[in-house]
Image: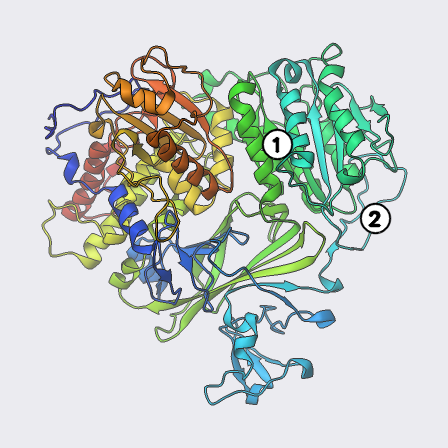
Amino acid sequence: MSVMYAHSNHIPQPPHSAGTKYQGFRRKINPDQIPSATEAIEFDRHQWEDTVYQNTPGEHVPFSTSDFVGLDQGNSSPKFVRMTTWNIPYTSRLAGECGVPMAAVFQPFADLDPREEPVPLVDFGERGPPRCERCRAYINPWCTWVRGGNAWKCNLCTHETEVSPEYFCNVDANLQRMDHLQRPELNRGTVDFAVPAEYWATNPPQRLLMPYFSAEPPAAGPRRPLPMNYLFALDVSSEAVRSGLLHTACAAIQDILFGPNACFPPESELAIMTFDLTLHFHDLSSDLVPMLVVSDIDEVFVPLRSGLFVKPAERQTAIETLLTALPERFAQLAYVEAALGSALRASLAALAGRGGHVVVFQSTMPRVGIGALPGEPNEADMYDTTKESSLYVPRDNTWRDIGTECVEDGIGVSMVLAMSRYIDVGSIGVVASMTGGELFYHPRFNPHRDSPVLHAQMQRLMRRTTGYNCTMRVRTSKGIRVSEYSGNFFQRGGATDLELGVLDADKALSVTLQHAGGNLDPRAYVYLQSAVLYTTVDGQRRVRTCNVALPIVELAWNVFRLSDLDATVYYLARRAISQMGSEKLANIREDLTENCSSVLLSYRTKCSNTSSIDQLILPEAFKGLPIYSLGIQKSKCLRARNVSSDVRNYTAHRMLSMSVRSIMHFLYPPLLALHDLAEDAGLPDPTTGRIVLPDIMRDSHLYMEAHGVYLIDNGETMIMWIGGSVSPQLLLDLFGVDDLIALDAQMSELPRLQTKLSTQVNNILEHRCTQRGGRLSKFFIARQNLDAAELEFSDMLVEDQNAGAMAYTDYLSVVHSQIQQVLRDGGTIGGAVGLRNSIW
């Protein structure tokens, strides 16, 4: 049945990859009356932009997409910890009946608003921070003082621990210490503790077979914390030279070392290695910078004992000479292959015994050396079969071994992948995933478009808060336990600790929680504490703790009242992605729909069972759940179209490391109508000085007009769509030309003109870049019916029928039908009544 719309001047749907139509009878749905994700986002943003979030248990929490100032009063800010529900069900049965997953998302090094107080650093000297004698939890604001202040009771396990004489203080009538306000660890939820030698990292045990050849025995025992070393490994194969990656990489490294915005840590040292069919080490202690070549790429070793690592400030001339010469040196001598696995093992050998960060620039699939990979698989024959899951796991376990070896030595690996053909991200990318590093993905590398983005990525890599040699554990109070961890990290079988070579401000990890038997006390709280033991970039060993107290409730209504859409969507997305290596993608997508329906069905039966079964009842907290569930299915790692495994694996890696805010923008990209900006949009507010941001609109062509200019940005890609009937004056104000055909569709950034509209839009783009810590999105122009970028733009309109999935209105019909069938016939979503077969 067709849907009637109030307006007739909307554009037709842009060219797109085919979607799926709804099968069977459906009622007429007016898209203007279905729940809008943007309305809730904008309402929350305006609510918190001038209000301080008090951060006390039992309150509504700001959305992750809102800029807010949080007050730490013992509970960590939602920027550090988010819960799927901020009220914990008192029994496992109630938790199951509600259908809301119990999970927490931790982002320990998250960036704070400049108006917020920084995380305090507390130093207890050689005795270290006070810890519970039984469960080893750290002292925190939710502990209580007993025996006149001579002991403290752990809020997690209730054990009483004696207070050392140096830490003793009398308590007042409220049983609080007299020095409570002077002790950050007793009134702040997020704290850094300086720790003594017993917390130092330990060198990995000596292996029978070492992964690299070393003339000296490997270091053993505790490892003194030192400033972080960086090793830049550059692919110098013919593809890297031809594409311009080598030249761009050398320029980006020079920029972070010596450019106007130099940001390399002054205490750190760096090494530069190049590789193709052989490995090349450069002696930076000599002004001539001799190159030492290691031709044995199966049993690698480091030929330099000194001069490999130097402080850039002390060897600027030598480093600049080398980086300037590299693109020319290999322009005529380049080989086709690049031994990435051997280069990573050599990096491990160079950083062994102290840890650090390896940044690799790679442009071709490694077919030689350690971890050499066979030819490209025939993906077309594997798509939508039981063999497809093999595309999302490493084809050679050597890459897992390399990742494990790096983590054990406290080394993180980040990779810049800039290739023109298949590179097998599923294999080589696992090293970055296991070590806590990052993938920067630039297919069909174009220096004109990609160079500014790559420079910004390297700046962010250096500037963001980062720790290395990291170990993380999440502790819970009695009655709750952690059942599963999710994210990019390494975890030994059966171990409760997570290990990461590096952990930075942009990375988040999540945990799934379960009841551990018995009922919780509704008059008490559930407590969570995450602790990250790490070494700072300048060489200090610390522990960062994040604490949160959560009320316990007996009614389903209270569970839904403080449910968190953002954290729930985050949990569902990660759970779906983690199944890619073992399940068919079609089944994963069906499970996502059933999970969405189950949550809404639980609310329907527990909190609104008096309504007619013909009504679709959505809880206030989960009005956006269906559109975000659809967005997960339309993401490039899960969508039901032929998408290359490299793209799927890269997207999966990114979504498993993203912050909550980033993933919400990625799944439902903000869309702006630039031709319809308010007078003050994009300009500083005269009272606060902050940029006035325009409201975003719904992601659908149904709300777009042919004379308009629209900007969509998911954090990775930014596309400016220009309608065929656009006003010449609008083009002049934005681009300096008045003819749509004359517009340069290859521009990589918006020009800066002396017009009000240009100033407004550029200010908005700068603000978004600042929100992401300086990272740029790739910029594309999509003129209506003219440019290829319009295909990508169309697929980013989540509410439309595209990307191998339904339109939002049809998807709501499916969800509603699943709920109706259970209400009418009994059973469960996807259970014995056979809903999956009947709906799909």
Res 219 label: 2
Q: Earlier in the sequence, mark 2 or mark 1?
A: 2
Q: Residue at x 30, y 31 (%)?
A: 674
Quadrant where the N terminus sits is top left
Which residue type does callout 1 highlight? Answer: Met
Res 210 label: none
Which percent across, then down, holds residue 574? Answer: 44, 42
Q: Nearer the viewer, residue 767 or 405?
A: 767
SS of the residue at dot 2?
loop
Which percent across, then down, holds residue 486? Answer: 50, 47
Which percent across, then down, holds residue 75? Answer: 45, 65
Is residue 634 shown to the viewer in this render?
no
Identity of the residue furthest to the right in this view: 215
Q: Could you give the CA–CA distance between mark 2 and mark 1, rounded to whole angstroms?
A: 27 Å
Determine whether 529 is above or below 389 in the image.
below
Question: Could you tell whether 740 is left or right of 104 in the image?
Answer: left
Q: Which residue is mark 1?
A: 415
Quadrant where the C terminus sits is top left
